[in-house]
Image (tube, rainbow, N blue to C red):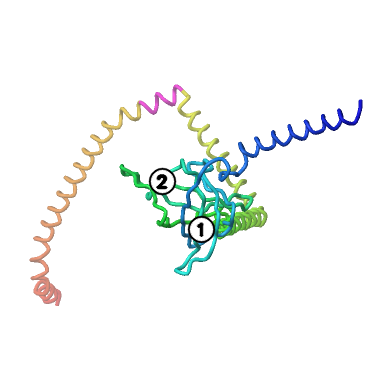
Amino acid sequence: MNNRVIQFRVGVMVLATAIIAGILVVLFGDLPSLVQSTYELRMNFADARGVSTGTPVRKNGILVGRVSSVMLDERGGVSVVADIDSYVPVYRDETPKVASTILGDAEIELVAGRIVPPRQPVTSDEVLRGSVTKDPLSAFSTLEPKVTASLESLTKASDAVATLSTNLEKMFVKDDVELDKTVKKLDTALETFTLTMNNVNDIVGDAQARQRLKDSINALPDVLVDLQKSVGGISSTIEAADRNLQNLEGLSKPLGERGESMVQGIDRAIS
């Protein structure tokens, strides 16, 4: 194999590689100026952190252009110009938002607002006012105080539970003797109750005792009647005694009134 054949094959391989690389660049690379026309989209952000030349511009998640220039605006904020593919319209109701990924890369997302047909495209001299969405790290930093407060509350709660368990343990250890006494008293009370119930069971369980108790209960009305009669007799006796006392009072009263004269008469008779 001579040198010409080798050089020819090497040349063919280099040419094929260049063609394939060009196709890949056209398909997946950022060469809009070579394959399609673009137009400028002017935007203004209060904070364009992370935005630089080449930052992607997306609409509904699709890459539609890239940032071509970033500069400070004399009227305030940051002026950003992006080259948008000519076949992608941008409307006045859309808002460009700067978003940051977890890795810190920034991109601009065109978010549609309230759609009211017919929609009006942005002209070349108009400027869209953009905003900045919080990146995940900023969200975590915002949540940090709340998480810290929650952890502190959880720590205090765990400390309170630990203190309570310690106090309970001390109380049970300290009052161990009293607890034993209380248990013994309960045992004694249960034994007494059991003995009482056994005695009651012995009485109630005896057929003769039950019959005597039943007879006593049945005879109770007669006893009450006899008691009532006895009380009535006692009342009559008391009334008779009262009358006798009244009679004696009637007899003794005149004697008392004439007692002195009678005594004097007796004295004179004796003299």
Q: Nearer the viewer, residue 72 or 177?
A: 72
Task: For the residues labelled 2 and 1, say whether their Cβ atoms are less than 8 Å apart.
Answer: no
The x and y percentages for residue 29 are 62, 41
Farthest residue in the top direction? 207
Residue type at the position of mark 2: Ala
Left or right? Give the position of 93 relative to 37.
left
Left or right: residue 182 versus residue 95 is right
* Residue with the mark numbered 1: 80
Q: Secondary structure at mark 2?
A: strand
Q: Name the residue at 62% across, 38% down.
A: 26
Mark 1: amino acid: Val
Question: Image quadrant for the N terminus?
Answer: top right
Residue 157 visible, this orientation: no
Residue 152 is drawn in which quadrant? bottom right
Would residue 237 be found to the left or right of residue 149 on screen?
A: left
Task: Pick whichever, 199 or 97, lies toward us.
Answer: 97
Alpha carbons under labels 2 and 1: distance apart? 19 Å
In what element is the residue under mark 1?
strand
Whether 166 is among the magenta residues is no
Disc sitting over residue 6 in the figure? none
Quickly name the residue at label 2. 112
Q: Nearer the viewer, residue 239 or 72?
A: 72
- Which stretch is magenta? 207-214
Report x, y in % for residue 105.
Answer: 61, 52
- Residue 263: percent from the left, percent from the top? 13, 73
28 w.r.t. 49: above or below: above
Q: Quadrant of the C terminus?
A: bottom left
Q: Residue at x 39, y 28 (%)?
A: 213
| Residue 203, x across and y down, in percent | 47, 29
**Front-lying residue, 116 or 121:** 121
